[in-house]
Image (tube, coloured by chain):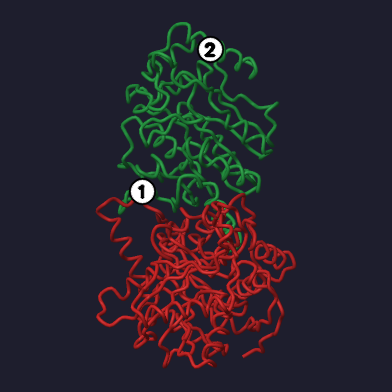
Chain colours: A red, B green
């Protein structure tokens, strides 16, 4: 094992370094705030001869994802980065990448969607593509951003999976924030991630094949079913790969990571960088004798219902804190968790909180408030509103 | 380049009787040979040739979406180079006129500007035929389509055809040409030049559609020929984007009147003598510019 190198870097640099260690062949990319540093850094690595790869500086995100698809189908290891409107512009092609079972990795600087235009953090961009058939991982910090990129390539390329993976790092809170990151040695990543060879053929004149066929009603559904079975099958692969990564590099990853959940009555569930603040809130509440815990969701697709239900076993109330909203319904995590409990006799009270949209700060006191509201619902049986908005500037609303 | 011409676009595909597109693809692949990877866009070509579990293609192809044959091909070409497999392999991006003139125009411009070693072939049947004959920026003046219908107040399509080949040439690309399925030797010569070009090449291939143009399915080639013989569609080529010095490769000795081209097509049947005179005048002016 080589030594890990400690660096102090921005989140975008962490995902770029993670990608570089995976030796991608082709990087089609289009700049967008807050992810621009990713293609810039990859371009520098290529320009300096540190990475033997080709950039394709395309004219749009739609073309970025299209070129990713063409390159991946040709047998290349492919990555890109985007955010917000860019992910939205790619939307059509996201489904095609996964439908054609082409592994690739995209780092997303999670950013709000227009309108109003806003460059700051929320998870609406990737949550809006939760049904695209991509695996989705969310990082709490820059270290996780780097590590999850490496895990993403390995999981997506596993022949039991063969699906594209998104790694979300929160806009600015991570993309532009400098943190200490341990960077694995190249030879160890090479050992962890073997070169990619598509197991079911590629665009090759020696073995001609048609990719992207027209699927009639006699066949289409089975293609989709096979794709869904692959994403279901990725559950075990994710566990295996996370375990191997921990063994090799010493950092633990789980689909859902509990914190003070063993005896907890109330548990908060978070995704992304807000987890750090939530952890501080839990520490504070624990000191006050409150039985509160926290779950950090790292893997949002596939949605880890079994793991969440196991951790939440015996818990009375759950505060599901979504940094996204499906207007007219709920936050995405809440909907999925509620669905997971539908046929269960024993279930906790679930409360849905929406906060942190468009870069709105989320403070320790906000988590305390969400804890209190959930506790009150448990104690009184008065569940409150179906969706609770937190840290609202009432003056602006009026 | 294949020494021997192979049939790489198999018969039995689902094109309409008399479809010009099938002829074009078959002839283009005869020149390109088996060491070719193609991208195609959503539209007639994808529908007629890739219905799972069948395929008409004897070469590797990929279809992803409608507007991005050029950008998918960009990924293919760069991946081949990066993996050391580009040598001796042609990359051809096929697009219909909708996928080229309209929705895929941005992706095409990007592909041309970035200098990929790709031959882009636009198979032009002058409207959205796959979805039922809607107008496109490729639709010529006076043509009746389902979204530019001729009527009491309408001549049909009221805008002229977008000069796509000239626009592509204006990117300064090494090779641009127009061709027609009525002039196969000329088409094949241009395909050869295009794929031997180091860098992007654009081929605009005129390809009548009996279903959309509403002419007999046995008239496809003669209609295409009349387009050239009347000067409605001019066959030319240009190097390095120099459209001021383009080479007209097929010059009819005496141009036939446009009426001979327009009359057999029911998409033009509403046109009055006066309307046809307007079109004739425009074609005369255009041909004068081309020097014949």
Which quarter of the image is occupied by the N terminus of chain A?
bottom right
Tell me the residue at 48%/29% (across/down): B206
Residue B178 has which mark?
A: none
Label 1 resides on the chain identified as B
Q: Is residue A279 left or right of residue A267?
A: right
Q: Is residue B277 above or below residue B233?
A: above
Pointer 2 residue: B255
Question: Residue A306, how many percent across, how many down?
Answer: 35, 81
Question: Residue A215, how many percent across, how many down?
Answer: 32, 52
Tag 1, which secondary structure? loop
Which marked residue is nearer to the observer: mark 1 or mark 2? 1
Question: Residue B91, how many percent across, how many down?
Answer: 54, 49
Badge 1 and badge 2 both on one subunit? yes
Pointer 1 residue: B50
**Identity of the residue furthest to the right in this view:** A48
**Identity of the residue furthest to the top in this view:** B273
Question: Residue A89, how many percent across, how many down?
Answer: 53, 52
Whether residue A78 is visible: no
Determine crowd level at label 2: few under 14, some 14-19, many 20+ residues with C-alpha closer than 10 A: some
Q: Quadrant of residue B222?
A: top left
Q: Is residue B292 above or below residue A316?
A: above
Determine crowd level at label 1: few under 14, some 14-19, many 20+ residues with C-alpha closer than 10 A: many
What separation in Å lies between label 1 and label 2 (alpha carbons)? Answer: 40 Å
Which quarter of the image is occupied by the C terminus of chain A?
bottom right
Whether residue B124 is visible: yes
Residues B96 and B67: in front is: B67
Tag 2, which secondary structure? loop
Q: Is residue B284 above or below residue A21?
A: above
Q: Is residue A225 left or right of residue A4?
A: left
């Amino acid at each position: 094992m080589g030594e890990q190198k400690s660096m102090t870097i921005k989140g975008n640099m962490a995902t770029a370094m993670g990608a570089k260690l995976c030796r991608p062949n082709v990087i089609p990319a289009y700049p967008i705030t807050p992810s621009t540093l990713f293609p810039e850094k990859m371009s520098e690595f290529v320009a300096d001869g540190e990475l033997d790869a080709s950039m394709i500086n395309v004219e749009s995100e739609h073309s970025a994802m299209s070129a990713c698809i063409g390159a991946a189908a040709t047998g290349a290891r492919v990555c890109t980065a985007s955010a917000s409107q860019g992910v939205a512009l790619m939307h059509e092609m996201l489904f095609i990448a996964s439908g054609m079972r082409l592994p690739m990795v995209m780092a997303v600087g999670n950013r709000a969607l227009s309108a109003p235009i806003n460059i700051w953090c929320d998870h609406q961009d990737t949550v809006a593509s939760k049904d695209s058939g991509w695996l989705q991982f969310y990082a709490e910090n820059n270290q996780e951003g780097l590590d999850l990129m490496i895990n993403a390539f390995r999981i997506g390329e596993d022949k039991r999976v063969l699906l594209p993976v998104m790694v979300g790092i929160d806009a600015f809170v991570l993309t532009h924030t400098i943190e200490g990151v341990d960077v694995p040695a190249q030879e160890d990543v090479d050992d962890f991630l073997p070169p990619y060879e598509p197991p079911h053929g590629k665009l090759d004149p020696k073995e001609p094949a048609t990719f992207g066929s027209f699927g009639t009603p006699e066949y289409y559904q089975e293609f989709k079913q096979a794709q869904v079975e692959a994403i279901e099958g990725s559950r075990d692969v994710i566990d295996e790969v996370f375990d191997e990564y921990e063994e090799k590099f010493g950092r633990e990853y789980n689909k859902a990571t509990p914190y003070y959940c063993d005896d907890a009555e109330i548990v908060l569930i978070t995704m992304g960088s807000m987890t750090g603040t939530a952890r501080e809130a839990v520490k504070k509440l624990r000191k006050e004798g409150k039985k509160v815990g926290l779950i950090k969701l790292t893997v949002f697709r596939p949605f880890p219902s079994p793991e969440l239900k196991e951790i939440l076993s015996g818990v009375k109330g759950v505060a599901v804190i979504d940094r996204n909203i499906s207007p007219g319904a709920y936050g995405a995590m809440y909907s999925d968790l509620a669905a997971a409990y539908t046929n269960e006799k024993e279930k906790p009270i679930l409360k849905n909180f929406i906060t942190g949209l468009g870069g709105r700060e989320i403070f320790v006191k906000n988590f305390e408030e969400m804890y209190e509201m959930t506790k009150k619902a448990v104690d009184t049986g008065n569940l409150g509103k179906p969706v609770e908005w937190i840290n609202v500037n009432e003056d602006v609303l009026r | 380049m294949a020494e021997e011409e192979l049939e790489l676009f198999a018969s039995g595909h689902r094109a309409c009787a008399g479809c010009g597109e099938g002829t074009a693809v078959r002839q283009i692949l005869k020149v390109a040979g088996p060491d070719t990877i193609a991208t195609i866009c959503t539209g007639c070509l994808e529908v007629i040739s890739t219905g799972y579990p069948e395929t008409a293609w004897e070469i590797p192809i990929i279809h992803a979406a409608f507007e991005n044959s050029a950008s998918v091909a960009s990924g293919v070409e760069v991946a081949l180079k990066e993996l050391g497999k580009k040598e001796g392999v042609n990359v051809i991006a096929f697009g219909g006129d909708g996928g080229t003139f309209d929705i895929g125009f941005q992706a095409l411009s990007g592909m041309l500007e970035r200098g990929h070693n790709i031959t882009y072939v636009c198979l032009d049947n002058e409207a959205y035929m796959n979805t039922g004959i809607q107008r496109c920026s490729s639709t010529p003046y006076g043509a009746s389509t389902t979204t530019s219908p001729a009527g009491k107040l309408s001549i049909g399509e009221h805008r002229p055809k977008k000069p796509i080949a000239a626009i592509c040439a204006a990117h300064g690309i090494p090779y641009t040409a127009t061709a027609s399925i009525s002039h196969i030797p000329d088409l094949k010569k241009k395909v050869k030049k295009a794929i031997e070009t180091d860098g992007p090449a654009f081929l605009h291939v005129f390809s009548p559609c009996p279903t959309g143009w509403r002419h007999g399915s046995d008239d496809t080639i003669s209609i295409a020929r009349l387009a050239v013989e009347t000067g409605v569609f001019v066959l030319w080529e240009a190097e390095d984007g120099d459209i001021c010095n383009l080479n007209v490769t097929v010059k009819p000795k005496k141009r036939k009147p446009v009426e001979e081209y327009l009359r057999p097509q029911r998409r033009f049947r509403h046109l009055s003598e006066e309307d046809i005179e307007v079109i004739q005048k425009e074609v005369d002016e255009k041909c004068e510019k081309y020097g014949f």
